[in-house]
Image (cartoon, grey):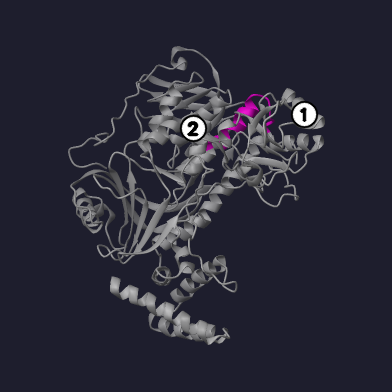
Amino acid sequence: MTTILTQNVVTQTALPFADLEQVYEQLAVTLDSLPEKQQTLFLAQLALALAHRIPDIDQVLTAINEAHEGTCLDERGS
Amino acid sequence: MRPEGKGELDSLYFDYPHFPFLCPGELKGEKKQHRVAIVGAGPVGVAAALELARQGVESVLLDNKATLNDGSRAICLSRHSLEILQQLGVDQRFIDKALGWTRGRSYFHDQEVYRFEMPHSEHERFLPMYNLQQQYIEQFLVDKAMENPLIDMRWQQAVSNVAQSDTGVLLSVSTPEGEYQLEADYLLAADGGRSIVRKSFNLPLHGESYEGRYVIADVRMKSDFPTERRAFFSPSVMPESTLLVHKQPDDIWRIDYQLLPDEDPDQAVTESAIRQRVGMIIEMLGEESDWELEWWSLYKAYTLALDDYRHGRVLFIGDSAHLVPIFGVRGLNNGLADAVNAAWKLAWVLKGMATETLLDSYSPERRGATLEVFANAGKSTRFMTPPSYGYRLMRDAALSLALRNDYASRFADPRQVTPYTYAESPVTSVDDTSFSAGPIPGAPLINRRLGDNNFLLDHLGTGFNMLVFSEDGSVTPELQTTLVDLQKHYSDLDVLVIARHASTAFFTTLIDQQGACFDGYDASSGSAYLVRPDRHITARWKAPKAASISTAFKTALGESR
């Protein structure tokens, strides 16, 4: 890790980055194990399962927003 | 490869030297057992020769070429490497020529999503990274080696086979004027990825090879864009690919791009294919000036290493021991660290100041560094060139989130080379638990500013160094006796006292008026750090005792733990 992040706004309850990396790897491997048409369904189920574990609706809605903005970037750029 | 009509050494900006063949003593009937033979006069082999010479040991350095490496290859030198070059006395030419940098940017679909800044402070003499073509890196090192009477440079002498016995190594060497046998006590194999030495002993590399092939191309082009690392993920000109751009001296730009899985590599490296692809990329970068093609090459990412970097009297250094992917600039930088690690240990064994067991620590330390590299390089490589649909989807998800969310931008971190800490090494002492900060045993020294153009690392001696912290420069009579006794036993031990204020002192004293060294090393008056010739800390104490210093020294030289 050689970078300094200037605006690292991570709340105290956030998952440590090393764990987030593990999630990244696990998701990549799981996605690869699924047939293509089930991947979207899998991700939607995962979103609901994770949301169920967060007792604060605002955080969940913020996350939905974050992801939505990300896809807008993706479409505009492409 | 170079454009049609150009020779292998026909560069737009670099004049390749020609090194003549000089008839070696062995071909004139002289018999000599050399102390150390080094195979391969690339940057790693020459750095090892310079470190041996710095420690007072002669070496003979053989290379089959009559000049330096063709083409640019490695271009990034880390701060830690510059600190090595400083110890070798060659840093100034590097600083004068190289382009230093501290930052980089990542783009996704042509939009900037992430900027990174590498750690830097007023306490560092060197910037985090420097770009310099490998020819210059080799030239500066070779020039220094050729003026050193302890280094016997033998150009145009190819090693074809190597054997060893209990007393030494035997090299079969072919030259323009015939073949001869060269004998030496020890051998450093710095002969690269296709090492002849490795093949002579039938030693296999183990590890993985990654999906994807990459082209590296150097072009000459005038541009005011600053020296930064730029990474383009899914750029519009080649949406399935990843692209890296680096600036080098002499208006040379390194363009590095991934070939598509279905692309024929033979076709992709034809001059017309390179020109077309590079032209598109330069247009995308928004550069409008003319450009000329200098050199290009094709490579594949590997994480391969020998199981043991020591094979009896042979130590493998650099690419002969390990092949790493380029992402993170670890090949050359780790090779240089291998070179000085192997060289100082060998020198101390040959000088009779350490037993041969010291050499046993070379492989755990440097192979440990390689394995850490592999762990990081695997992640970098999977991010740069996702090997499957799942990895690509996750990569694109992280990059899409990265624009507005820092937690995701860390995935785009280039994970560049950092010096490895030899904490688990058999020659590193257990840490003194009363420290709560500062570099731990096994870690390299950190630099600290002492004044204008004056830094802690400028003052190190060539052998071991003992840093002793003191308010006024005085040390207790007990510690002074211990250190003087040690200096009688180990002639190559320098004691550097770091004092907050000046006074007459027995040992060499550095004034740390701002207390930067005290703070950085979590030291109080009386604390001490024992440092190896390669600047790695071997032991430290808040309040040292004579017996523990002596024990730590023995541990550092492989005598006990």
Q: Which residues are magenta?
A: B339-356
C-alpha gap between disc 1 and disc 2 = 35 Å
What amino acid is found at the position of numbered circle 2 in the picture? Answer: Ala
Rate crowding at label 2 as few (under 14), some (14 to 19) or many (20 or more) other CA atoms within 10 Å. Answer: many
Mark toward the viewer: 1 or 2: 1
Residue B75: image location, x then y, percent: 38, 43
Residue B32: image location, x then y, percent: 54, 17
Between B530 and B378, the residue placed more toward the observer is B530
SS for tag 2?
Answer: helix
Q: How many marks?
A: 2
> Would residue B20 be found to the left or right of residue B547 on screen?
left
> Which residue is denoted by mark 1 in the rendering?
B480
Mark 2 or mark 1, which is nearer the start of the sequence? Answer: 2
Between A19 and B525, the residue placed more toward the observer is B525
Residue B400 located within the stretch drawn in magenta: no
Residue drawn at point x = 75 percent, y = 50 percent: B433
Between B106 and B24, the residue placed more toward the observer is B106
Residue drawn at point x = 36 percent, y = 19 percent: B177
Relative vertical location of residue B13 with respect to residue B412 in this rendering, above or below: above
The C terminus of chain B, quarter of image: top right
Chain holding disc 1: B
> Would residue B526 be found to the left or right of residue B280 on screen?
right
What amino acid is found at the position of numbered circle 1 in the picture? Answer: Gln
> Which residue is denoted by mark 2 in the rendering?
B47
SS for tag 1?
Answer: helix
Residue A65: image location, x then y, percent: 42, 81
Chain holding disc 2: B
